[in-house]
Every structure is written in C-alpha cells, then in structure tokens.
Image (cartoon, rainbow, N blue to C red):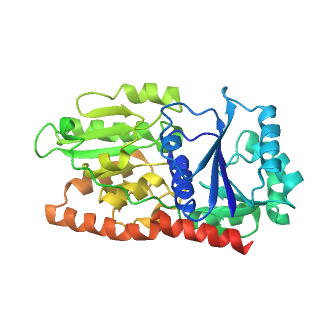
Amino acid sequence: MKILHIHPSMAGGGIEAMVCGLANEMAKTEEVTVCSIFEPNDDDIFWNRLSDGVNRISLGKSKAGFSLSEVFKIYRLLRKGGFDVVNLHGFFYYYAFSILLLHHKVKFFYTVHSDANMENWGWEKRVFRLKKCFFRWGWLNPITISHASKDSFTQLYEINSQLIYNGIPCPKSSAQDLVKEYRKTPNTKIFIHAGRISKEKNQVALCRVFKSLIEQGEDVALLIAGSIQDRRIYETVEKYLGERIFYLGERDDIPQLMYNSDAMCLPSIWEGLPVTLLEALSVGCIPICSPVGGIPNVVVDGVNGFLSESSNEDDYGKTVRQFLLLTEKDLNLIKENCKQSFSKYDIINTSEKYLKYYKSN
C-alpha cells in the first residue's frame, strides 16, 4: 500500500510522536509518506526522527492561521500522489475539499486524538456538519484512540468508529541520570510533567500543588517540559519557577528523563490517550493523573499508577500526597506493573491494527 500521513507539523507533541511512530513502523512493509503542512524547522523533533524509509513532503506554510492556498496544495498533492490510503490527524477543514473530490479514488481515514467534542472549535466548528456527513456517507473512516474517545465520537456523530489504542516505540533507557542536578538531597522525589503549555494540561494548578508541598517541607522537585502554546498560561507558570520547580523547554528526550524520575504528573482537564502516559509506563515512571479521556482505560488506581478524583487542584494534591506516603517496596511493585501494562501499547501492535483496518476498507 502507498500510505500518506498528514499533519500541520512534526515538531514536538503527542500527536506528532504518534504519527512518527506509526510511519516508521509501517514503512517496514509499506510505502509511507509523511506530509507536514508547515515548513519544518531544523529542531522539529519528530520530523527529524522519521526513519530513512519514510518519504517526507512539506507544503511550506510559514505563517500561523488558516490559508486557503494550503487547501489547494493538499488537493494537488493527493490528486497526483497516487496514494491508496490517506490518514488525516485532525484539522478536517484543510482536507474537506480533497475528500469531496477524491473520495472515490482514495481511502480517507481520520484519527480523533482527543475527546470528539473538544476538537470541534474554531474552523472545525464551522465545518462540523460537513464532517458529520462525510463520516456517515463513508467518505471518511474514523479511528478513535481510547474507549472514552470512542464513546464521545459515537455520542457526537451518532455512528460507530474503529477503536485502535495509541502506541509508541519502546524507548531505550538512559544510562545517565539526566535529572541528577535537580535533586536537592539523595531523597528528593523528582516529578516530571511533559506537555505543551496550554489550558487542557492544567499546569497552573500543578504548580500550585507543588508550591504547597514545597512550603510544607516536602523534599520534591517538579520538572515541566514542553513547548509554549499559550503565552499567558506560561507567564503564570513562570511565577512559580524557582529552586524546586523548573521549566526545561521543549525536549526530545522525554522517555529518558522519565526513566530517571520518580513519577509523571498529568492533571489534565481533558485528554485523548496521551502519549506521555504511554512513555511513562514504558520506563516504569509512575503516572499520577486526572481521570479524563482514555486515562482511566489505562491506569488502574494504586496498581500501575494513581488517579485523582478530578482535575481540581485540591483533589490532585491529595493524590500526590498519597504517592509520597508509599514505601520503597510499594513503589518498586507499581513500577513493575507500569512496565508490564505497556506491552498493549507498543507501536508494533498499533501499526498492525491500523494496516488491518486500512485493508478491510
């Protein structure tokens, strides 16, 4: 099969990590191309991680915001590319014109990477009725990434979707202690939060929780890694940065940082099935999460991680404190459970299910 994955960019982020992992794995048996609508930068993490076996195309977009010219560039690419399968990853409004004219020649698939309701804002909201029709007519085949995502899709569009769990390649462990410099004492517990600075990731509440813990004398440190999507939220987060709360910027070594950390924090307000959660499981970094999106489908409270009652600051703080009371024996058991539960989310399994679904249509 000749397969195209297309997304606005391949910088840093969960969707980009997923697209990169899928493309690299599929390229072992299929002809795979990844298209970035924006012109890649030299430091775009997942553009650089695409294997030599993956073809790369950029449409050269340089400015933020919707551009009609990109719609026609995408159409020309799909019309001339000879692709059997085109997998879209959000941003339906860029592709509606191409689907309308090419659905009889190309199999279109659309991965919903979050709650189906939450992705319909801005331009997506304006073309919602058209997208709903395309799903119902079978011109666009939906893929959801968790039971929660699937349920939200069914409720919103009143049709079924194909459930395929997110997956990532099993990362290599780090021989070097990458977080050593952040330990104030040999007993300092290192917590890491990896995610773009944005509303849904709830970083302000996370910083408040750790500010309270630090003021109470807890020997902890919080590392925040991710791109700045919302400058106003970052300016608030910045006020909490200090000797025990650190912003690391965008990193390309998140699994390695997690390998050396004690726990991963994810107090999100909404989610799909976050790649950062799978990265934590893969290296035995205990996840402490809010119960949103597909997270409760993965994390069993007290077994392979912890779930707070809500995304609320007080509820999340209680759960972090619960973690701090664990004995070393308890911690080691949960870490092993994390690693064992990861096998279901290995990119090899995810890729096989995608290819099977492509062929069945």
> Residue 238: which quarter of the image?
top left
When the figure is inspected, residue 291 is found, relative to residue 63, above or below; the finding is below
User: What residue sits 15% from the left and 61% below the top?
Assistant: 328
- In the rendered image, residue 38, in percent from the top left (x then y), is placed at 64, 34
> Residue 338: which quarter of the image?
bottom left
Q: Quadrant of the C terminus?
A: bottom right
Q: Nearer the viewer, residue 291 or 112?
A: 112
When the figure is inspected, residue 20 is found, relative to residue 148, above or below; the finding is above
In the drawing, does residue 179 fall left or right of residue 76? Answer: left
Q: Quadrant of the N terminus?
A: bottom right
When the figure is inspected, residue 126 is found, relative to residue 149, above or below; the finding is above
User: What residue sits 54% from the left and 47% below the top?
Assistant: 16
- In the rendered image, residue 13, in percent from the top left (x then y), is placed at 50, 44
> Residue 344: which quarter of the image?
bottom left
User: What residue sits 82% from the left and 43% below the top?
Assistant: 76
Q: Is residue 227 visible?
A: yes
